[in-house]
Image (tube, rainbow, N blue to C red):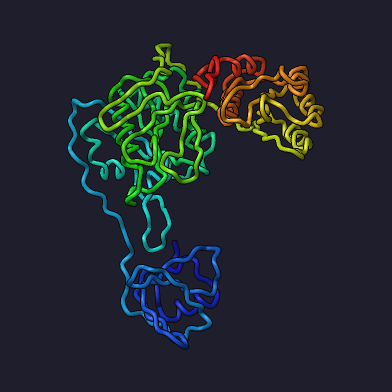
């Protein structure tokens, strides 16, 4: 950040002439009023003529530079910094658990000068500010990356998978991955496939609100994840987040059957088509009926092919989008169709062209509950006849990630069988009424 981040033109000139920096206590005189407060950085795309200060009452105000008759620095401001507490002592006899940091809100804190949420904690710092963790496990931490989850790409999934394999080989009995929530379900699906038959619990967790906010869900999510991992009763990849808006219980979701269904609530994540695999309520862990321990040989395959697409059908959908994807030499397409698995018949010609070009085209549904059944209506039967593959009740996002993984690790002739093989509980064998 520059000394006068976000300021430009006239407002920047005024501040520079007065020798003022971000955080300084300043007095601004206008034609009618005097204001005193600390100079704040500005949002980079906001109105450029305003100077923003934080008043002593805690409110932020913007003052139009055109109305300023005098500005002066009263006192230099010390830039805010965070000093984490010392790392607590741990017992070597406790289960060895690795916490891997990738960024996101769970590794962030509020900058109270600007109101922004900024990445601030390494995985080590995160551990040190939740000392309760030392009661359950012998924690070791490592920061893999520090990015917002919308910046996560398939190459990042590969890097995370490599690090998980490394931590397994080091003898960790569980692994927790701190992650931003926006694409956390994509990552949990990706690792579910990449770490097929994982012998230990790998639990991805995050936070809707940063660790220093009173309403933060970060601590409970992290503590519950460590408790779950330390019990050593699960193996595979899971996602752990609040079960409700209350601060008492965390759901452990299957990595391929979970979705973020709310932008900001603490219980934004829900299992789709199944119940959560487990519930953690303080020290009590309840394992659901859905869980079956997998004792097959660990079989990591960690490559992903990015050149596949997820297309959401809608009225007025332009089939030329499919033609353009074909021109880009894409490997495959996942269609997010309506109801039981339909798209407008105007798309059929382009879909057939894609299949004739050797592309895999799979069908999922926009409906969160239920499963594909393309034999019921003629629109679905026509698509089956063209060669579209129905993907049961697989979530569209999971199907996309699975197709990326399949093309990254298998030959073209194997893709159909791989997509239809239930590798990581990505689809249910039968739908239960009401789910």
Q: Residue at x 79, y 24 (%)?
A: 352
Which quarter of the picture shows residue 169?
top left
Q: Residue at x 50, y 37 (%)?
A: 260
Q: Decide if residue 386 is on the left or right side of residue 305.
A: right
Hey, which residue is sitting farthest top in the picture?
Answer: 296
Q: Nearer the viewer, residue 136 or 316?
A: 316
Task: Examine the rendered structure and indicate whether residue 258 appears above or below residue 123.
Answer: above
Q: Decide if residue 217 is on the left or right side of residue 400.
A: left
Q: Nearer the viewer, residue 390 or 159?
A: 390
Task: Examine the rendered structure and indicate whether residue 315 appears above or below residue 254.
Answer: below
The quarter of the rendered structure image containing the N terminus is: bottom left
Residue 314 at x, y = what percent?
A: 71, 37
Hey, which residue is sitting farthest front in the picture?
Answer: 434
Residue 60 at x, y = what percent?
A: 41, 69
Residue 331 at x, y = what percent?
A: 68, 27
Q: Nearer the viewer, residue 91 or 166?
A: 91
Q: Nearer the viewer, residue 63 or 270?
A: 270
Residue 22 at x, y = what percent?
A: 39, 69
Which quarter of the picture shows residue 303?
top right
| Numbered marks: total | 0
Q: Residue at x 43, y 11 (%)?
A: 296
Q: Decide if residue 275 is on the left or right side of residue 153.
A: left
């Amino acid at each position: 950040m520059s000394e006068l981040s976000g300021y430009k033109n006239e407002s920047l000139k005024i501040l520079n002439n007065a020798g003022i920096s971000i955080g300084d206590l300043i007095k601004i005189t206008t034609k009618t009023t005097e204001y005193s407060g600390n100079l704040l950085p500005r949002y980079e795309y906001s109105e450029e003529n305003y100077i923003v200060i934080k008043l002593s009452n805690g409110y932020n105000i913007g003052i139009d530079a055109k109305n300023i008759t005098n500005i002066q620095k009263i006192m230099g401001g010390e830039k805010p910094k965070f000093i984490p507490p010392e790392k607590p002592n741990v017992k070597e006899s406790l289960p060895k658990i690795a916490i891997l940091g990738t960024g996101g809100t769970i590794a962030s804190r509020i900058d109270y000068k600007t109101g922004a949420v900024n990445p601030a904690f390494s995985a080590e710092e995160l551990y040190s500010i939740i000392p309760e963790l030392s009661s359950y496990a012998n924690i070791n931490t490592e920061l893999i990356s520090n990015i917002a989850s919308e910046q996560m790409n398939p190459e990042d999934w590969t890097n995370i998978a490599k690090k998980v394999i490394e931590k397994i080989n080091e003898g960790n009995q569980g692994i927790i991955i701190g992650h931003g929530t926006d694409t956390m379900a994509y990552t949990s699906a990706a690792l579910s496939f990449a770490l097929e038959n994982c012998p230990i619990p790998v639990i991805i967790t995050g936070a809707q609100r940063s660790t220093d906010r009173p309403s933060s869900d970060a601590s409970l999510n992290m503590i519950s994840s460590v408790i779950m991992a330390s019990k050593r009763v699960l193996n595979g990849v899971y996602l752990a987040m609040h079960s409700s808006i209350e601060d008492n219980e965390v759901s452990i979701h299957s990595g391929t059957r979970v979705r973020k269904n709310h932008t900001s609530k603490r219980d934004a994540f829900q299992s789709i088509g199944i119940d959560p695999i487990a519930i953690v309520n303080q020290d009590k862990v309840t394992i659901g009926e859905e869980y079956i321990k997998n004792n097959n040989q660990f079989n990591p395959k960690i490559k992903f092919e990015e050149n596949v697409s997820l297309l959401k059908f809608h009225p007025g959908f332009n089939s030329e989008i499919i033609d353009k994807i074909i021109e880009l030499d894409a490997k495959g397409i996942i269609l997010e169709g309506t109801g039981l698995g339909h798209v407008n018949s105007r798309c059929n010609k382009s879909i057939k062209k894609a299949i004739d070009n050797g592309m895999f085209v799979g069908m999922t549904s926009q409906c969160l509950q239920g499963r594909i059944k393309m034999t019921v209506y003629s629109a679905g039967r026509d698509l089956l006849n063209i060669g579209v593959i129905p993907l049961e009740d697989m979530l569209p996002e999971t199907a996309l990630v699975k197709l990326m993984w399949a093309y990254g690790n298998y030959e073209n002739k194997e893709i159909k069988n791989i997509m239809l093989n239930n590798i990581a509980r990505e689809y249910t064998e039968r739908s239960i009424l009401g789910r």
